Image: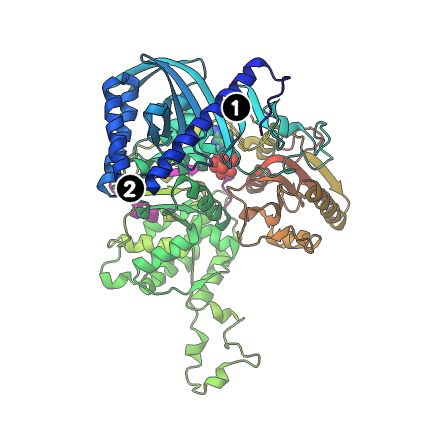
């Protein structure tokens, strides 16, 4: 039962009453439609709907025509496919309410994910992805005069009402109308709250959050259906989402500004607008890490994009190489030394190799094995490696040269099995503990290739002939700053003529190898005319976190944005003489937090997998603690203890950085970017914990950190 207290101002009570009545009308209309469908009158239902729409067109205002035509098209195509019309989910049929006052008088439009109209009942649920009216919702505020071309016609009027609504299990639970936020408590009573109330209330006590206290009340109760972000897209994001499908799009912006959000919504719009040209089966999302791949799959499902393949960069590379070289399997070495990997992914190697390794003359020379040998010639050449390191201008240490030489030597050594080919007794090739004789010896590397070599080998092959990879209708690269130029070269082979793709990225989060810059990225993909959007608003992180993130980046930080995040809990800094004390402190704080806020998501983000393992030990016996070392996030409430290499693109209500020491994060640009990634995973409150010598990238007292 709902209860609207007299303490609410008159206009707030009117808004609640209006929205309740609207929802009731929608639900009864949907129920009637559902019953009709159940009686097997689906096709007749569509015919009737078409008839109603046609009648409506005859009398409709100019502004309504495009919407009506779009609905008619949809009904027609459903009839052609002999499908029944899908009805909106009655439990949550729409997420926003727009009332426009145009030439034909006021009209209500409800934004949802499934179109539905019963014009007689005055119910119009429009699909945010294609309805021209949706544009008005995203690009105008309440009270604004709008002027938009819908197709050929100019539509004008005023935005009378623009509200976000949350409907959970068929019940209206929240309304946002401008600065007014109305919330229905579990008992049914409505009250007004400030927009940032959840950010400022401390766990249950109602006082402002303090840095030494972990918990802001964020995870105290379960939030079943927070606003779908679809309702919240800002005008800039909506413009980017609406970029024509045949145009490559580069989405840039600081951490948490909505790059992934834009990329995924664009996919949804493209798939909806032209499913023939852009079927889900021919669209792919490639991301650098497993955690982000899992998150993306979860975000794609409610957008109706369950059929789009999401792959990690590594999985995609291996599959592409197997297809390009027509091999059932490739013997990979999974433990490439970090410096060797870095050299192989660095942009300078792209130019250096292009100049050195010529075009293979015969098709016979383009087998994986032949090209691997050809590549090894370069890796064995000390002078070549020296020139690469020199060109990297300090981004690759000189020790990378010897490491690469040694690593190549081991990979190209004669396999032990060949050397021992005279031994015919198989038992003599097995060690006493039952392992193959090569295992755990340097010989195990013989005959393997590094994952980092795969795109290089494909690049070499492509100099002579096509890679034969399946073309895709649209490709999204998220965290595109982490793709090497060779990888981008291969991505380029997936794109059709129109180069339909979305690249989302932030050079400040580049942590893998050197970054060549966005012009070089586009150049590698052979893209000349990308649309570019730079998202300005920091949505994820509260202001204290945004400020710390900028401090960490030092001189690398981009210009300060006017939208530096919402107000929020101050960052807590905690320093201890030794590591054990720091870990015990974290363990205690986590126990306390989880008991107060069982629905919160907490990320304990260590500087390395080893450190994560050590921190995990102090909470390992807790049912809510999870050690995530390979990106296998579940996105359930609780505590994920993980490392900075696994969290790109993810977010947690609370973040604790357990080891911000001078050793883990020294004063160099790469450490700045790694720490920046860790810091910016916070959507609510951040704690920075250190022991021994604190990292010099952090200056908790407010003094400027060294630049
Ligand atoms: N217009 C918006 N209004 C409110 N929240 C938004 C808006 N756009 C995005 N968000 C939210 O902000 C958070 C960050 O969005 P997203 O992950 O898309 O950012 P990102 O730029 O890709 O982040 P990162 O740089 O970490 O990869 C998400 O929780 C998302 O739902």
* Residue 173 visible in the snapshot: yes
Out of 314 and 150, give the one closest to the viewer.
150
Q: How is the model colour-coded?
A: rainbow
Residue 513 in the image, given as x and y percentages of width and height: 48, 46
Residue drawn at 39 percent across, 38 percent down: 503
Q: Which mark is residue 273?
A: none
Residue at 43% in and 27% down: 25
State the residue lying farthest toward the front. 39
* Disc 2 packing (10 Å; few <14; some 14–19; many ≥20): some
Res 136 quadrant in image: top left
Give the quadrant of residue 22: top left
Where is residue 300? Give x, y as percent.
42, 42
User: Is 365 situated above or below 63?
Assistant: below
- Residue 113 appears in the figure: no
Label 2 CB less than 8 angstroms from ligand 1: no
Q: Quadrant of residue 688?
A: top right
Q: Are circles 1 and 2 on residues that touch, CB within 8 Å?
A: no
Mark 1, ligand 1, within 8 Å: the answer is no
286 vs 602, left or right, is: left
Q: Is residue 185 above or below residue 430?
A: above
Q: Which mark is residue 176?
A: 1
- 154 versus 334 height, above or below: above
Residue beneath disc 2: 278
Mark 1 → mark 2, Cα distance in angstroms: 35 Å
Tell me if residue 1 comes above or below residue 493 in the rendering.
above
Residue 217 colored in magenta in the image:
no
SS category of the residue bearing label 2: loop
Magenta-highlighted residues: 488-512
């Amino acid at each position: 039962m709902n209860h609207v207290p007299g303490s609410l101002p008159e206009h707030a009570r009117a808004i609640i009453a209006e929205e309740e009545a609207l929802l009731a009308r929608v639900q009864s209309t949907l129920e009637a439609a559902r019953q009709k469908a159940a009686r097997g009158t689906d096709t007749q239902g569509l015919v009737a709907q078409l008839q109603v729409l046609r009648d409506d067109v005859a009398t409709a205002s100019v502004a309504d025509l495009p919407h009506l035509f779009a609905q008619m098209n949809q009904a027609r195509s459903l009839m052609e496919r002999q499908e029944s019309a899908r009805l909106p989910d009655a439990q949550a049929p729409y997420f926003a309410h727009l009332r426009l006052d145009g030439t034909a008088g006021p009209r209500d439009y409800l934004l949802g994910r499934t179109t539905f109209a019963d014009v007689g009942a005055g119910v119009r649920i429009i699909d945010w992805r294609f309805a021209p009216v949706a544009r008005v919702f995203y690009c105008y505020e309440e009270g604004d005069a709008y002027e938009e071309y819908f197709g050929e016609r100019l539509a004008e009027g005023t935005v009378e009402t623009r509200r976000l609504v949350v409907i959970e299990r068929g019940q209206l639970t929240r309304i946002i109308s401008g600065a007014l936020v109305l919330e229905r408590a579990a008992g049914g009573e409505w009250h007004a709250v400030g927009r940032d109330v959840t950010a400022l209330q401390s766990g249950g006590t109602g006082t402002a959050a303090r840095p030494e206290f972990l918990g802001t009340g964020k995870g105290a109760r379960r939030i079943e259906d927070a606003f779908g972000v679809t309702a919240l897209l800002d005008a800039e994001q909506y413009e980017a989402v609406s970029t024509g499908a045949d145009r490559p799009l580069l989405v840039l912006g600081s951490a948490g500004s909505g790059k992934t959000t834009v990329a995924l919504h664009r996919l949804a719009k493209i798939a909806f607008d032209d499913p023939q040209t852009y079927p889900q089966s021919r669209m792919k999302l490639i991301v650098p890490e497993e955690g982000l791949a899992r998150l993306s799959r979860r975000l794609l499902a409610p957008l109706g994009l369950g059929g789009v393949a999401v792959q990690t960069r590594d999985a995609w590379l291996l599959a592409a190489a197997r297809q390009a070289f027509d091999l059932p399997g490739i013997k990979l070495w999974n433990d490439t030394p970090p410096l060797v990997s870095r050299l192989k992914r660095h942009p300078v190697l792209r130019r250096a190799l292009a100049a050195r390794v010529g075009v293979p003359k015969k098709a016979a020379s383009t087998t994986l094995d032949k090209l691997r040998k050809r590549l090894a010639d370069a890796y064995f050449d000390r002078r070549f490696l020296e020139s690469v390191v020199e060109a990297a201008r300090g981004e690759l240490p000189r020790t990378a040269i010897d490491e690469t030489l040694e690593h190549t030597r081991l990979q190209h050594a004669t396999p032990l099995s060949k050397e021992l080919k005279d031994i015919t007794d198989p038992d003599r090739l097995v060690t006493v503990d039952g392992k193959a004789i090569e295992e755990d010896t340097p010989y195990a590397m013989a005959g393997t290739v590094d994952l980092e070599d795969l795109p290089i080998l494909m690049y070499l092959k492509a100099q002579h002939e096509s890679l034969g990879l399946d073309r895709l209708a649209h490709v999204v690269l998220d965290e595109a700053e982490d793709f090497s130029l060779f990888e981008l070269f291969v991505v380029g082979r997936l794109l059709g003529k129109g180069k339909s793709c979305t690249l989302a990225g932030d050079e400040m989060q580049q942590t893998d190898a050197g970054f060549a810059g966005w012009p070089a990225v586009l150049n590698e993909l052979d893209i000349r005319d990308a649309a570019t959007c730079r998202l300005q608003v920091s949505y994820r992180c509260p202001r204290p976190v945004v400020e710390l993130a900028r401090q960490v980046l030092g001189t690398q930080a981009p210009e300060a944005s006017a939208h530096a995040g919402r107000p929020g809990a101050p960052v807590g800094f905690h320093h201890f003489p030794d590591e054990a004390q720091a870990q015990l402190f974290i363990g205690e704080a986590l126990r306390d937090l989880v008991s107060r806020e069982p629905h919160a998501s907490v990320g304990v983000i260590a500087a390395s997998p080893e450190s994560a393992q050590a921190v995990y030990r102090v909470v390992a016996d807790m049912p809510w603690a999870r050690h995530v070392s390979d990106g296998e996030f579940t996105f359930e409430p609780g505590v994920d203890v993980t490392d900075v290499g696994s969290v790109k693109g993810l977010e947690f209500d609370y973040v604790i950085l357990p080891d911000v020491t001078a050793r883990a994060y020294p004063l160099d640009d790469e450490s700045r970017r790694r720490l920046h990634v860790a810091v910016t995973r916070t959507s609510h409150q951040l704690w920075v914990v250190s022991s021994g010598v604190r990292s010099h990238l952090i200056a908790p007292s407010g003094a400027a950190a060294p630049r």
